[in-house]
Image (spheres, rainbow, N blue to C red):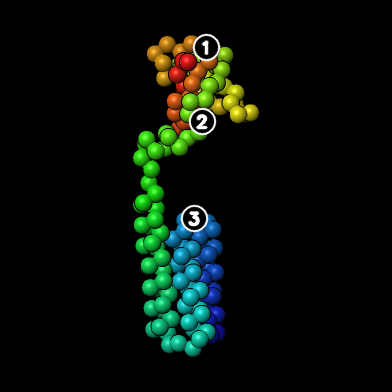
Amino acid sequence: MSDTSLWLILAGLLLIAELTTGTFYILLISLGAALGSLVAYLGQPLEIQIGSAAVFAVLSCLMLQRARKGSVNTEQDRLHNNLDIGNSVQVEQWSPNGHAQVQYRGARWSAQCLDEQPAPGEHVIVDLQGSTLKLKLK
């Protein structure tokens, strides 16, 4: 079996591993293996194949890490970019623990009251955590 075939098999196995994990890092390593396959196809020695695959994988992973680190949002950015905050919802009834189910955007949402005494009526969305709306009385 040729070096090109071995590199392609490795790239395929890494791609399968990527599909099971959902990170981009293994995808970049898989692309490095594909580059190793191309270098092998061009007839370069094994050292050049391994070196080019490794350099590509390391540099691309470092670039991805830097890009992800730069895109971390602060809490204020998260609240500012959430289009649901400030919208109104109607709460018919609160449970004793300050939770309710509300109709919002055509679906049932879980809601939590941030006021001391939950009261039925129109509320404003002040935060969203997962699928739970954080509400205050309007």
Numbered tag placed on residue 84 in the rendering: 2
Left or right position of 107 against 62: right
Q: Tell me which residue sits at (46%, 15%) in the image.
A: 137
Tell me the element at label 1.
loop
Does label 1 or label 2 sit earlier along the sequence? 2
Can you identify the residue that label 3 sits on?
Answer: 21
Label 1 is placed on what type of residue?
Pro
Disc 3 packing (10 Å; few <14; some 14–19; many ≥20): few
The percent coordinates of residue 67 (x first, y second) are: 39, 56
Q: To which quarter of the image does residue 50 belong?
A: bottom left
Q: Tell me which residue sits at (52%, 11%) in the image.
A: 120
Tell me the element at label 2.
loop
**Is 66 placed above or below 73 here?**
below
Label 2 is placed on what type of residue?
Asp
Can you identify the residue that label 1 sits on?
Answer: 120
Q: To which quarter of the image does residue 97 belong?
A: top left
- Disc 2 to disc 3, C-alpha distance: 30 Å
